[in-house]
Amino acid sequence: MLKRLLSLFTLFSIISLNTIPVLAETCEKTVAVEHLDVHKKAPCNVVTITNLRKTVEKGNVLQFVFDEKFFSKCAQAGQMVHFVVPQALYTCEGTLILPCGTKIVAEITNVEKPKWFNKNARVSLIFRQIILPDNTCIAIKARPFTKDCKLKEGPWTTAGKLTLSTLTLGIVGAGAGVGFAFIPNPAEIGAGLAIGIPIGCGVGFVVGLITPGCHYKAKKGEAVYALLIDEFSVCNK
């Protein structure tokens, strides 16, 4: 009887010694709190480092680039759009979060067509998945980091459209002025230009203001910023 008790005691001791290190390894502990420096206006830049994973907190801003050309005129809700991480993402303290070449998958949720009075198209999408180079998939939830969380052409594109419209009709006006002046009296060409150019430019500017805005276009490699709506974690290797 005594021998059996001693045997059981020894067995339990061996099991306990083997189990303690395993429990210690699976018990998650915060090792450090580090930071990202992707965008100076990010609501949050905290990354929590534990012995098991790296958690990028909600409110961080990440940068992705288009992995393909994009044109809002050909896009529709439900379509997937592919991005990549242009360069390895490290914390300011030197911890690797996402390696270079990491793929990002986003889903278009809505496409607003250009509207009258120069309102540009707007594309709503949500970033849904991270695919690491080793094919590990991580769910994320993020939206474009813009004022209205939508992708659209910037003011320079709109200004270019207005300028083109103004110049085009300005040239048409100049030609018309020259023509009308030349027919009765070739000497009056200068007067025709003086009248035709301002009228043509004025009409072109007004037309540019009231016509529909621009579709959203992006080249492969064009960068966008994404705001995390929820945290995501990358397991330690």
Image (tube, rainbow, N blue to C red):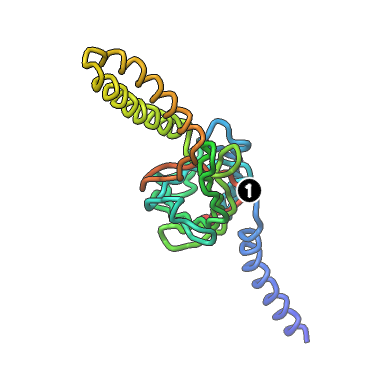
- Name the residue at 67% across, 77% down: 11
Q: What x and y, as percent, mark residue 3?
A: 73, 84
Report the side of 22 relative to 39 (left or right).
Answer: right
Q: Which residue is mark 1?
A: 229
Q: Determine the secondary structure under disc 1.
A: loop
Identify the image quadrant of residue 138.
Answer: bottom right
Residue 223 seen anywhere in this rendered image of the structure: yes
Identify the image quadrant of residue 48.
Answer: top right
Identity of the residue furthest to the bottom in this view = 1
Identify the image quadrant of residue 205.
Answer: top left
- Answer above or below: position of 236 versus 4: above
Q: What x and y, as percent, mark residue 219?
A: 37, 45
Work out whether residue 2 or residue 145 is closer to the camera in this orientation and state it.
145
- Answer above or below: position of 130 versus 200: below
Q: What x and y, as percent, mark residue 10?
A: 68, 75
Q: What x and y, as percent, mark residue 81?
A: 46, 56
- Answer above or below: position of 193 versus 229: above
Report the side of 71 relative to 40 (left or right).
Answer: left
The number of numbered discs placed on residues in the rendered structure image is: 1
Residue 237 seen anywhere in this rendered image of the structure: no
What amino acid is at disc 1?
Ile
Identity of the residue furthest to the left in this view = 186
